[in-house]
Amino acid sequence: MTNVETSMGHSAGKARKSGANTWKRRSKGTGPIKNRNLYILTSAILVIAVIAVIIFISVGKNKNVKDLYFEIETKNFVNFMSDIIKKQNDSMAKTKPLREQPSRTRHEISVKLSNLGSGGNQGLNIPEQAIDVINSSKLVLNSRYDLKNDIQTGSLSFLLEGQSFLDINTFLDKNIMGLQIPVIYDKYFVLDKNNVSYAFDRFGIDMPAKKILIPSEINDTLKIPLVEFKDIFTDYIAFMEDIIAEQNISITKNVKLKQVEYPVSNYNNPVLQGKNEQQDNDKQKQQNLVTVKSETSSKFGAASLLGVVSKSDIKLEPETVYQSQESSNNRSKSGKYDVFTIKLNEDEFKAVAEKTIDMLCSDKRLFDITLGKTYTVCEMLKDAGYFDLSKDLEAAYNQAKKYEDINMLKQDLLNIIKYSSFPEGFNMALTVDKSGNIVDRKISFANKMEGESKRMFSLHAGQFFTRLVIEQESSESKSENSLGTDNSNAVIEIEIIRQEEASRNFIYINCVNNIWPDFKAAINTTKTSSEDNKKKTLNTNYILDIDLTCTELGIEKGNMLIDVKREDRYGIDFTLPEINEDTAVDIKSITEDGIETVKTEIQFSAAKFLLTNQYLINAFTSED
């Protein structure tokens, strides 16, 4: 080795040793090498993050329209069902004390009628005296119950001008039932509610009913498990994704749409506007919406529901998004939305419909929670003898019963599709905001069955309203695809407006040229609730306000106001009535002579009751 090499070797060794010592010293501090490694590590993380974002964005951009559409449908449906499930769970939590403790529920129901008019022999002819009786009457239902011990008592009172007119009292102890009508007979009739035919036979009453079903038995059977329902229809949306082709779905992004207040007041309905408001305020409201009406009715026809919407007014490429008054006051007048358009021609629509029918009729889960529950209730009613009360009920039962064979239902539905034509296919426009929330949906299609006139369907649904128009061409109709331009066509219009924050719904119905008399109805429902934890009460007030016009029945702007006040109280004390020979008649053990004595007393009391209240009978039978 040369001197140069030796010198270099020593120098390198010293450098390595010096470098190692330097590394040791610097690794203990916060020197530049440590900072450099930290920068390298941070940079690597940032690069990875950027790459991940780029990949995510690329995947998102490459996601086809069909996948995006069904992703939005699934998300909105799941959110919708989750909200319903939450509301149900909240309601169950609120009413839990009523189920766990002895409780009382009281309903007070009153009805007010006005402007029903007189339709003559062919119309609705309610005497004014009868209306006065109805308006001054009240129905009070009071029930006490202990669900854990399966006992309850009930009373039904008919009040006339605040005074008790007729009372009916009941009690239920497991399967033993008691019935008392004090004005007719002051003792309870005690019987087995599952064998009432025996009681009818003993009194010589020809009645096919065999048992008494209480509402809770039917309600418990009909309850639909919402979580399972959500899962079933989430699977259904996935199924639809498999059978609808990509070319049937398109999207237009960043569409600028007007945001206008939904033209509610154009119904010219005093119920919706508030009957206690001053007339000039109502007129001002109407005037304020004239501009909105002129801008929107030409597009959707929703502002002029008292007329008939023409088909040309229903556009699949919307230019307007409707909002509630509260929302429109707090938002800008326009916004950007994405609009999906789904179009199926007749053959494509039939193929999708047939596959859908096959899928739904093959899903045992769906059958069990829908038709299965319905048939269970039908069998309960049949076993109780209720369908034997009339031939019409029995015929309806037999007609429904045949569809217990799901294959027969499936075949009938497939035949409807097979022997129907859908000349315009299926068209839908779905508008979503930038968060993927559905804000507007429009559906239109027409069908024609053999030997029948064409029917045209139009559905328009927003976040707080739903509107359905069904029109059937008349045999004299010559216009093609008129949807409302021919006055001889049969039309059904139904519109529902929801004001969830105010617990208020408005329903408008217009029927023209159908098999029943033409009519227009405006139905306003409101619900108010309150709680008092100290008094252990839940109070709810339901108002059903109906405005009706039916010229054939002589009704012009008639009104029916139904007021239901409900109070639930938990933690009460109550006992069943004392049952002995002085207070009750045991139908099973009473002798034949005892039966005859009771029948005589009942006949005498009933005759006395009718004579005493003859004026009420006259009020409903006399002619004004």
Image (cartoon, grey):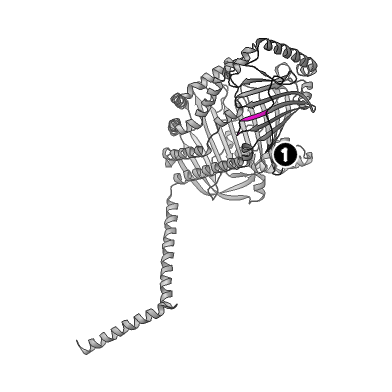
Amino acid at circle 1: Gln
Instruction: Locate residue 149: give its quadrant.
Output: top right
Q: Which residue lies furthest to the bottom in this view?
A: 3
Residue 504 x, y percent position in the rendering:
67, 39
Task: Give me the residue at 52% from left, 19% from top.
Answer: 398
Residue 124 x, y percent position in the rendering:
71, 20
Of 146 and 414, nearer the camera is: 146
| Magenta-colored stretch includes residue 270 | no
In this picture, residue 35 sits left or right of residue 10: right
Task: Give me the residue at 72% from left, 42% from top.
Answer: 535
Residue named by callout 1 = 273
Of 191 and 602, nearer the camera is: 191
Q: Give the range drawn in magenta.
A: 147-153
Task: Give me the residue at 57% from left, 26% from top.
Answer: 472
> In which quadrant will I find the C terminus?
top right
> In which quadrant will I find the N terminus?
bottom left
Residue 229 x, y percent position in the rendering:
51, 37
Of 490 and 180, nearer the camera is: 180
Residue 410 shows up from this direction:
yes
In this picture, residue 37 sits left or right of residue 286: left
Residue 561 shows up from this direction:
no
* SS at circle 1: helix
